[in-house]
Amino acid sequence: MAENKKMSTAEILAAARAAKAAKAEPPAAADVAPPADTPAAEAQKAEAPKPAPAKPIAKPAGAAGGRPSVAEIMALARAKKEAEQGGGAAAPVEKPAPKPAPAKAPTLKADGDKPASKPAAKAVAPKALARDTASILAAARTGAKPGPMSKADAPPRPAPVAEAAAIVKAPPAKLAAAPTLPSKPVKPAAKKGADAEADRRGFLEMVLGSFMATGFTALSITGGLFGLGFARFMFPNVLAEPPSRFKVGFREGFPAGKVETKYVAQYGVWVVNSDVGGLQQIYALKTVCTHLGCTPNWLEAEQKFKCPCHGSGFYKDGVNFEGPAPRPLERYAIRVSDDGQLEVDKGRTFHEEQGQWADPDSYITV
Amino acid sequence: MHSNGLFLKDVAGFLGSYYTGLAIMNAIAAFLIWRRKNRTGEAVFWASVATALMVLASLAMSGSATWVPHLPESLRKLVNTLSGPVNYTAGTTALFAGAFVFRKFFVKPMVAWTVFNAALLLMGLAMADENFASIVMKADNVPIVGLVFLLAFFTWVATKQAVENDERIARGLPPLEKENDEKVLVWPDLVYTELICMVAVSAFLLAWALLLPAPLEEPASSVKTPNPSKAPWYFLGLQEMLVYFDPWYAGVALPSMVIFGLMAMPYLDFNKKGNGYYSINERKFAYLTFQFGFLELWITLIILGTFLRGPNWNFFGPFEFWSPYKVEVLNNVDLPQMFWVNMLNRPLPRVAADAPWYAQMATILLREAPGLVIMAAYLFLLPPLLAVTVFRKYFAKMGLVRYLVMINLMLLMLSLPLKMVLRWTLNLKYLISIPEFSLNF
């Protein structure tokens, strides 16, 4: 295995080269004897690569075996078409088709086949058609759709490829222009059908000016409708979120030193009664860590808020003292409402670092 | 809390098969050493190791507190008391340095095999402790344990090749990769290997997902943060960084710098050696910088974040119970506080809230003056200083712009360990702390 791998590049290259050489030779041989009769040339072709194979050649040989069949298929297909249209007026137009075939000849591979298969084509066609799947398929295709056939027939390639054999090729190349003719009468027929439909399909195009305009109009209408729907989505019929102002009970419920945690789950607020700078206050702290926004926990035993994400710690008054939190917790506005209950307003926040904790709206003096 | 009977009965089966697995691994190794390398003495040694492991396996299977192999209580207590962020980082740094200095010793296959076995054995012994096992055997931590070993293995393989190449180069030979640079084809050699790997890994993941189901937790809530709240494992290094820095720096600026720096590497590197082969001696600076940044500042932080950070992001020893009530005294102070209040015994410079904006700015600048001076010196004074001393050759070869990019990337990278050290030694929170503009460093 290891040995195989080590040798692989060189070996494969060598093999490939050998295969190429093997492939190049037989056509050359065929070249020499183009007038040989069809079956002979074909047999030669098919057999020639076979003896050559080293390991990897198996594939190229197969490919080479396939190659002539393509050319052959074309010839056969053409022949079939001719046979079909033979009686019709199309026959004269089609006639030139076999002739341009030699124009394809310049390629080494096809060279051997073409002249050989051409004469044979007419006669062999019905028999050959039944012979293998590829030809059956090709024949079926040609029958259904003349397009590919005419494309294959049109030989724009051979002309540029032509090198030494130019003498032979030049006249066929000229003729080659002719074979495109058969396709023309076919195409308009197809187009006529399309035109009939285009009248209907082109209605929007006509109204809006162009194809692109149609597309973009449709796109902008869809986008606009989607945007409207999205905007409606922003104003739900029912708002499930708690109100930003809410009452938390009378001040008797918050004895000195207590951190009330029962509003955390619903409102995200701690109500604290504590001594701040020598002043006993009740204030509402926002349960959002000022570092990255996790919810800290109140640790009664240690009398501090501790954040589980990065370990920031805050005193009871909300001032940060450990971990990475850069500033104290924020306060919400709090006031005594008309009925004597404390009311927290989450609409306003007070930042210590901006000196806003001095604002009388941020606390209630006890 | 640990080693109670119930827990041991639960893990007995696992520990037994764990030791059996180790024994089989060593038996295979012994066989290969005997058959392939023809070293009978070593083979006998590893075979006896395998036998000893089989004995451990049978002891572990018993599930009784006296027989299951475990670490002595006193040792576990000692490990717990000794472990902390400072010792952990110092220890891993020492390990990193030691592995680098003695790399010629560690790349020997037999040494590596011994270390590997010792690590696995130690882990087996430690897993008899309930607290250790509950962290290491947690379904979402298992892959991280595997990755630690995988990372160690790949680092070892690369180091081994580098050391071999260095020796060859010293003897005047071309590096191994150049000598035997037979190319293979992408198709089929590579593609087939990849296909096989893909199938094998898919099958493995499928089996894993069935055997170790991912834990499901309660529905998320914006007002309830799990404790501890951990990022995905590959971001735990970042999360650890965030302990020491402001979010915008550790979460945005520094990671961007990492990406930018990695992209800039090919343009900064003027060393043409080491192209296409492993070598340490030929590119010591590049090697050390990268390995320090990757292994020390990223991987060890991930391990720290995964296994040693518990509730409230406190540090817990490997055998310590993760109590959410653990109290750790961490009084962090900003530099202005240290400078004005503690050193000069004066209050922080303050200004009335309704003062004009320029007075506010001036006060802030005055308050943060010490930090600003230190940062300016670090970022603007140090580069030219280093250019004429330590990095003189680099400066000459790289030119001004490339040198400045390189040195700044390096200083920013080093700002992480420096800040960590400052936090541990001086309880320093931020050098510059301007909460008014959410600007902290």
Image (cartoon, coloured by chain):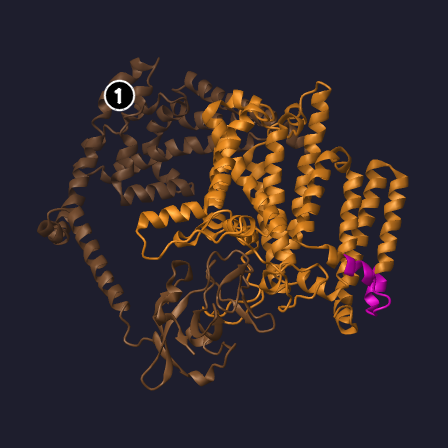
Chain colours: A brown, B orange
- Left or right of residue B121: residue A228: left
Q: Position of residue A158 (x, y in %)?
A: 31, 23
Q: Does A154 appear above or below B74?
A: above
Residue of label 1 = A172
Secondary element under disc 1, as helix, strand or loop, is helix
Looking at this rendering, what residue extends furthest in the front direction? B345
Measuring 57% from the left and 46% from the top, which residue is drawn there?
Answer: B419
Measuring 53% from the left and 20% from the top, which residue is drawn there?
Answer: B396
The quadrant of the image that shows the N terminus of chain B is bottom right
Measuring 61% from the left and 73% from the top, which residue is drawn there?
Answer: A301
Q: Position of residue B77 (x, y in %)?
A: 77, 61
Q: Position of residue A205 (x, y in %)?
A: 13, 50
- Left or right of residue B11: residue B391: left
Does any portion of residue B55 appear in the rendered image?
Answer: yes
Amino acid beneath label 1: Pro
B175 and B390: which is toward the camera: B390
| Subunit of label 1 | A
Residues in magenta? Answer: B57-78
Q: Position of residue A105 (x, y in %)?
A: 35, 22
Question: What is the quadrant of residue B324 in the picture?
Answer: bottom right
B113 and A138: which is toward the camera: B113
Q: Does A328 appear above or below B242?
A: below
